[in-house]
Amino acid sequence: MQTAPDTADAARTEHAFELILKRSQMRLPVASGESMADVLHLAGVPLETLCEQGVCGTCVTRWLDGEPDHRDSCLSAAEQATHVAVCCARSHSPTLTLDL
C-alpha cells in the first residue's frame, strides 16, 4: 500500500491537463488545483465518491491512456497499472483517458 505525497509538494507539481472520457466521448479541462472528481461532477458524469482523499477506493476508475499521477493510498502498484482514484489523482501527461 502506498501513501499519498505531502499536499504542499503535490500542489507545487500540479498543472492543467485534459480529461478524456472514452465511452462518453467528452473532453474536460482540469485546471491546476481542481480535482478530476469535481470536474466530472460539474459535467454531470455519474461518479460515486466518499472520502475524496484516496483512502476508501469508492471513486476508483479504469484509465486507458496517459500517465496518471497516483496520489491515493488505496490502490496497490498492480492496481495502479490499470485504475486510478479520480478524487485525488492528477496527470503527468497533457491528457488522461478514462473508461467512462
Image: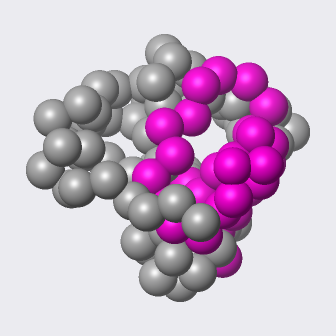
| Rendered image coloring scheme | one colour
Residue 29: horizontal and vertical position, in percent? 44, 30
Q: Residue at x 74, y 24 (%)?
A: 65
Q: Quadrant of residue 19?
A: top right
Horizontally, is 7 left or right of 77 in the view? Answer: left
In this rendered view, identify the residue nearer to me: 3 or 16: 3
Residue placed most toward the observer, 34 or 67: 67
In magenta stretch: residue 81: yes
Does the magenta-highlighted stretch encompass residue 80?
yes
Q: Which residues are magenta?
A: 58-86
Q: Position of residue 12 (x, y in %)?
A: 15, 35
Quarter holding the N terminus?
A: bottom right
Is residue 90 in sight in this rendering? yes
Residue 88, percent from left and from top: 44, 57
Residue 100: tell me if it is visible.
no
The percent coordinates of residue 79 (x first, y second) are 77, 53
